[in-house]
Amino acid sequence: MHKLSQTFRTTEFVELVVLGAGALAMWWWFHTVDAFDWLVDFMRAHESWELDEIFSAVILAGICGFIYAARRHSAAREELKRRNEAESNVTWLAQNDTLTKLPNRRFFEDFARRIDDRPTESGDGFVVFAIDLDGFKNLNDLHGHTSGDEMLRTVAQRLEKLFPNELVVRLGGDEFVVVAAAAAVADPEATGRRICETLAEPVQIAGAYTEVGASVGYANYPAQSESLAEAAHCADIAMYVAKRGGRNDVVAYDEDMRDLLVKRTQMELALREAVRTDLIQPNYQPLVNLRNGELVGFEALARWSMSDGTLVSAAEFIPLADATGLITELSEKLLTRACTDALQWPADLKLAFNLSPSQLADPLIGLRIVKILAKVGFPASRLELEITEGALIHDTDTAVKVLEDLHAAGIRIALDDFGTGYSSLSQLSKFQFDRIKIDRSFVSAFEGDSKQRKIVRAIITLGAGLGVSTTAEGIEKESQRTSLRTLGCQHGQGYLFGRAMAAHEALSLIEVRGSDKALRSRSG
């Protein structure tokens, strides 16, 4: 757009010079031959031709044409100005975070490439601080998305004030990076402490004071890394170590942590290959009617068996897929396979499938799922998507729209791990759900703990009052099943009914259950 504007101005200048020279030459010729007097004499001699009126009309047309051209020229300049402004806005939006107005991840990546490409001079060097807020999720849960946004803006302002001459970046969520010149940071440890102290100061939000902490990791470039981007990875690893240490902790990166970086990189490469070659497949855990023991469906659970037979925990690779952007491709492949497998089940059996928080933030997720169902030929009414409370707090407006689209398509929605967050009741009032899943942490202890039992009873009663069914997770003992059934819980899953199994094993279970049901029916 800048080149277009420059070309436009150059062409304008050339045309002005040419037309000006032409006008000057014509004036000189008119003056030399005394053309005007000749024209007047000619019109008088031919009065019957009405040449004076025609000449006047031509002059008026020329004036009008000049005015029109001037107006079109002005409009063209205004349009060009608007295009330049739009280009500037697009460039700004691409490289900056709209909430905090800080540079974003893309800006940081471009900045890092420029730093890495330039020759290293004596005295050059940076300290990279990776910052993650402690307690931010609780703030979002307790006070809502708007308060969380206000806290992020406050954090950004405090970091900019603390580092007025350095680069402060918001990578996303509650993660920030500061790139400071090594010469400006005499004591990185003390600077990290100052970051923690500054961010821990209370903030007044919605008339009440609240606070968050921060975990900080830092690394040096080029002393500890070959590139600025790698230094950011090193600082990120140190930050995770700090986060495990507790609130407001600061950790410096050292070579002992490099193994963790190498392992993380290797795991990411292995995950990409696993997604590409379909090594990650769905297994199916039975969902059972607690009243009569009949099978009502299966929950699809991702299982990754590496080429050497090593099993990778979903708790390890699902967050990694989320962080690396592989979750969309992985989820679509798993859902396609699960729907294809479920087509072989009886038509009354449901398929439950989990969505990650980042997927719920995708406005097009509903369309993606509907396309998969249409491609496979799986009825939307047999699909139930499970969503955790945490997935709903990052972008409430988008989540509401996504759930509305899914419901409109006939897909059922379950609120998973109910009771483990702080926003359960508020989420139930904002969003439409068809099922509540009681978290296994309550089920494992409710028989011997009266408080836990009251919580389980309250969740089941709440579900009944809202007209939604309840499913208990992690049922391992017959006594748990009996107690939950007595309390009014409709469905359950857990090792008592079966572990997650391969597709062919699920078919075998369906056949056995079908035979048992037929036998009971004949006996009755």
Image: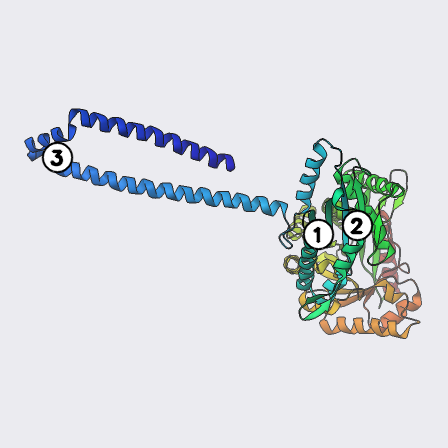
Q: Residue 446 sits in which quadrant?
A: bottom right
Identify the colour scheme used. Answer: rainbow
Q: Which mark is residue 411?
A: none
Q: Which residue is mark 2?
A: 319
As helix, strand or loop, the secondary structure at mark 1 comes to helix
**Quadrant in the picture for the C terminus:** bottom right
- Sequence-wise, the earlier of marks 3 and 1 is 3
Q: Secondary structure at mark 2?
A: helix
Query: For mark 1, does the 10 Å Cα neighbourhood hold few (<14), some (14 to 19), or many (20 or more) residues?
Result: some
Q: Earlier in the sequence, mark 2 or mark 1?
A: 2
User: Which of the two discs, 2 and 1, sits closer to the camera?
Assistant: 2
Horizontal and vertical percent for residue 276? Answer: 77, 38
Identify which residue, 223 or 463, lies in the foreground.
Answer: 223
Query: Residue 454, how many percent across, how many down?
Result: 85, 75
Residue receiving disc 3: 51
- Image position, residue 46 (x, y; %): 7, 31
Count of marks overlaid on the render: 3
Can you tell which quarter of the image residue 427 is in? bottom right
Precedes in sequence: disc 2 or disc 3: 3
Mark 2: which amino acid?
Pro
Does any portion of residue 377 appear in the rendered image? no
Q: Is residue 137 above or below residue 228?
A: below
Q: Is residue 507 left or right of residue 339?
A: right
In this rendering, the label closer to the viewer, 3 or 1: 3
Residue 497 location, quadrant: bottom right
Badge 3: residue crowd in 10 Å (few <14, some 14–19, many ≥20): some
Left/right placement of residue 40 relative to residue 399 reads left
Distance CA(mark 2)–CA(mark 1): 12 Å
Q: Find disc 1 in the rendering and name its residue.
A: 359
Mark 2, other Cα within 10 Å: few <14 / some 14–19 / many ≥20: some
Kind of residue at disc 1: Gln
Amino acid type, label 3: Leu
